[in-house]
Image (cartoon, rainbow, N blue to C red):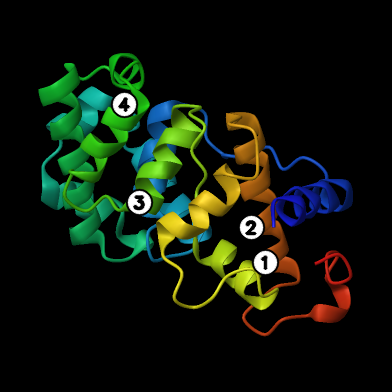
Amino acid sequence: MKNKILHLYEVLYKHYGPQYWWPAETKFEVIIGAILTQNTSWKNAEKAIRNLAGAGLLDLASMKNINKKKLASLIKPSGYYNVKAGRLKNFINFLFKKYGGSLKRMFSQDLAILRKDLLGVKGLGPETVDSILLYAGQKPVFVVDAYTRRILFNHKLISAADKYHDIQCLFTDSLPADASLFNEYHALLVRLAKEACTTAPKCGTCPVKSVL
């Protein structure tokens, strides 16, 4: 299995090249995007982020001070906007209460402790937390999303019963603990899932069909 996971990365990288993820200018914008993209497409989350940028809210102080109702109206394109406004506020409150509003201090925390703390923030599940840790914090944490599950399931590398942690360990046990590698690998899986391993798989165009 270890060889398959490594070979899959090599084939995808050779086929698609570097993906330059995450598409954001600041760590805070990455965090906002990770929360807003829950249960929606990146395209919709991006619309909401543009609304926040236009309102001058892509900084911690402004996000802390805006009221939840106004915030919800700005992130409406992302769907579940009232829920997500609450989750953004939950994260901000956590950051200021525990780390004085400093992302630098937060990301300086021990990884295991920080991951546990973030999972304790209401509304932040494993995928969102790990996206924050990997893409904003450059921590060696592999992100497992629906695209990853679909690809591995379609290629019989996991079963439907496998949990988030099981799938994550498949990667972390097979690869060196390298944030740049995890970043690139996850982005390549997203690319594969969007172009070939779709909900109606286009197996004829799949670059990994003959190697797994």
Q: Residue at x 49, y 35 (%)?
A: 134
* N-terminal label among 2 and 3: 3
> Element at badge 1?
helix
* Residue that mark 1 sits on: 194
Give whichever of discs 4 and 2 has the lower sequence position: 4
Q: Which residue is mark 3?
A: 126
- C-alpha span from label 1 to label 4: 31 Å
Quadrant where the C terminus lies? bottom right
Q: Nearer the viewer, residue 185 or 155?
A: 155
Question: Do residues under tags 4 and 2 come within 8 Å of each other at their CB atoms?
Answer: no
Q: Position of residue 130 (x, y in %)?
A: 41, 43
> Which amino acid type is marked by label 2?
Val
User: Tag 1: Cα neighbours inside 10 Å, few (<14), some, or many (≥20)?
Assistant: few
Residue 69, percent from left and from top: 12, 52
x and y percentages locating residue 111 in the rendered image: 36, 27
C-alpha span from label 2 to label 3: 17 Å
Residue 190 is marked as 2
Q: Which residue is mark 4?
A: 59
Is residue 144 among the parts visible in the rendering? no
User: Which of pointers 1 and 4 lies earlier in the amino acid sequence?
Assistant: 4
